[in-house]
């Protein structure tokens, strides 16, 4: 199988972009990792928190070279500890970020998330295989996050983890809430399944976000060919 991906991350109407994307590819061994973090605007240095968490997870994946569920959970707990430690470097400042990631190792897909950044997985026939559930208090969109990465609360970085086999024609889409809140769910789904070049699909999302987004917006579209 061949894995291709397209990304974008834009500040939208905000003064700065607190979203952060990291990708790692090892095509020779069939290993790919994608991490998207959305620094929380209500917290100081949200962009820094996003970078710390994404970098910590990617470093751990590089070291362990094993993305099974147990190791993914361990990497995420280490990232929460790293964020907590780094807050001391910045004078004890409170930081927070969401996180969603997808790791592909051969035919094995592992998805993990904390917060309200999302992952959608669609099969080659347009059938939904998986969609993350936002971690808002009371399961209410817009409510404070019940899970995520917060300094002083590493216990809140408890991920949902999903594993599946990937097949040719599958698409995996990661995005921050600035994107999914700007596009109607049916349009988001239908464009993801368009029989078009992935770059064209991403351009459509960017166009819609440029018109309607009220926040930073970021996305990763992964195509299994």
Image (cartoon, helix red, strand yellow):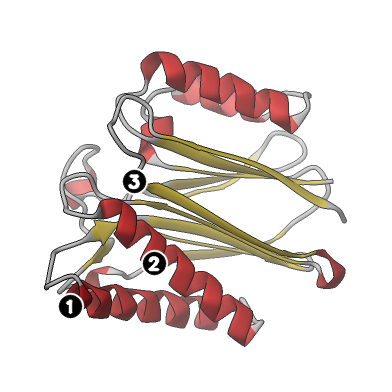
Q: Position of residue 143 (x, y in %)?
A: 16, 42
Residue 154 placement: quadrant: bottom left
Please give the name of the residue rendered at 15% of the width and 74% of the height, measured from the top-left corner. 152
Q: Position of residue 202 (x, y in %)?
A: 62, 29
Q: Position of residue 209 (x, y in %)?
A: 45, 22
Q: Position of residue 101 (x, y in %)?
A: 52, 59
Q: Which mark is residue 208?
A: none
Depth check: give the residue in front, 217 or 123: 217
Badge 3: residue crowd in 10 Å (few <14, some 14–19, many ≥20): many
Helix, strand or loop for disc 2: helix
Is residue 127 depicted above or below 25 in this figure? Answer: above
Is residue 63 depicted above or below 170 in this figure? Answer: below
Depth check: give the residue in front, 209 or 115: 209
- Report, in whole angstroms, how far the alpha carbon at label 2 lies from the one at label 1: 15 Å
In this figure, which residue is indicated by the disc labeled 1?
A: 88
In this figure, which residue is indicated by the disc labeled 2?
A: 53
Please give the name of the residue rendered at 23% of the width and 55% of the height, measured from the top-left corner. 45
Helix, strand or loop for disc 1: helix
Task: Please report whichever mark, 2 or 1, sits nearer to the chain's N-terminal start.
Answer: 2
203 lies left or right of 141: right
Residue 198 placement: quadrant: top right
Helix, strand or loop for disc 3: loop
Question: Given this view, does label 2 or label 1 mark the residue nearer the observer?
Answer: 1
Badge 2: residue crowd in 10 Å (few <14, some 14–19, many ≥20): many
In this figure, which residue is indicated by the disc labeled 3?
A: 18
64 lies left or right of 88: right
Badge 1: residue crowd in 10 Å (few <14, some 14–19, many ≥20): few
Please give the name of the residue rendered at 42% of the width and 13% of the height, measured from the top-left corner. 211
């Amino acid at each position: 199988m061949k894995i291709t991906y397209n990304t974008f991350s834009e500040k939208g109407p905000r003064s700065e972009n607190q979203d952060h994307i990291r990708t790692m590819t090892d095509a020779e061994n069939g290993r790919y990792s994608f991490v998207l973090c959305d620094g929380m605007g209500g917290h100081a240095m949200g962009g820094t928190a996003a970078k710390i968490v994404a970098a910590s997870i990617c470093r751990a994946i590089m070291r362990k070279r094993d993305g099974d569920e147990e190791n993914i959970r361990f990497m995420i707990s280490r990232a929460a500890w790293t964020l907590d430690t780094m807050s001391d470097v910045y004078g004890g400042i409170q930081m927070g970020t969401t996180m969603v990631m997808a790791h592909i190792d051969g035919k094995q897909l592992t998805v993990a998330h904390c917060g309200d950044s999302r992952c959608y997985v669609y099969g080659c026939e347009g059938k939904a295989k998986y969609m993350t559930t936002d971690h808002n208090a009371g399961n209410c969109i817009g409510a404070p996050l019940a899970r995520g990465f917060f300094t002083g609360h590493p216990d809140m970085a408890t991920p949902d983890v999903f594993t599946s086999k990937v097949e040719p024609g599958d698409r995996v889409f990661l995005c921050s809430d600035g994107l999914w809140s700007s596009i109607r769910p049916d349009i988001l789904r239908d464009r993801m399944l368009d029989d078009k070049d992935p770059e064209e699909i991403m351009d459509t999302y960017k166009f819609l976000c440029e018109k309607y987004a009220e926040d930073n917006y970021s996305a990763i579209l992964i195509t299994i060919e």
